[in-house]
Image (tube, rainbow, N blue to C red):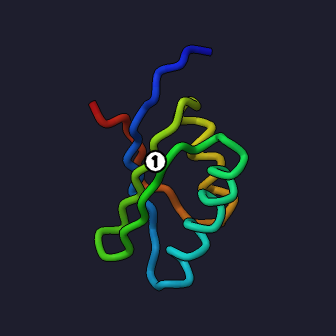
Amino acid sequence: MDDVEYSYILDVKMTCSGCSGAVSRVLEKSKTKGDVNDYSVDLDTQKVIVKSKKPIEDITAIVKKTGKEIRSAEIIV
């Protein structure tokens, strides 16, 4: 594994503050474990931005633990 930090943008179906809170909780837990370096969750745009050295598949798996639908996921260049 390399030491490159990636930025990912996920389009996550979030309809309320409970939804965005659930996503924030799993990402905060992952940040504590060192899997996520930084993140932001925007309920209005339904966008989640994650900075991590982990591959995008690992990040989407973390967010999927919430049961929320990920409509798209891409690397921000």
Quadrant of the drawing holding the C terminus: top left
Q: Residue at x 40, y 52 (%)?
A: 49
Q: Residue at x 39, y 57 (%)?
A: 11
Q: Nearer the viewer, residue 57 or 32?
A: 32
**Side of 33 relative to 58 (left or right):** right
* Above or below, 50 relative to 76: below
Residue highlighted by disc 1: 50
Q: Nearer the viewer, residue 8 or 37?
A: 37
Q: Residue at x 65, y 61 (%)?
A: 26
* Amino acid type indicated by mark 1: Val
Q: Nearer the viewer, residue 1 or 65?
A: 1
Q: Residue at x 44, y 81 (%)?
A: 15
**Side of 36 relative to 75 (left or right):** right
* Above or below, 63 relative to 20: above
Label 1 sits on a secondary structure element that is strand
- Residue 37, horizontal then vertical, whole percent: 53, 43
Residue 40 quadrant: bottom left
* Above or below, 43 relative to 6: below
Q: Residues within 10 Å of mark 1 (few under 14, many from 20)?
A: many
- Residue 42, horizontal then vertical, whole percent: 36, 69
Residue 22 quadrant: bottom right
- Residue 73, horizontal then vertical, whole percent: 42, 44
Query: So how many labels did they put on this image?
Result: 1
**Side of 35 relative to 13 (left or right):** right
* Above or below, 70 relative to 76: below
Quadrant of the drawing holding the N terminus: top right
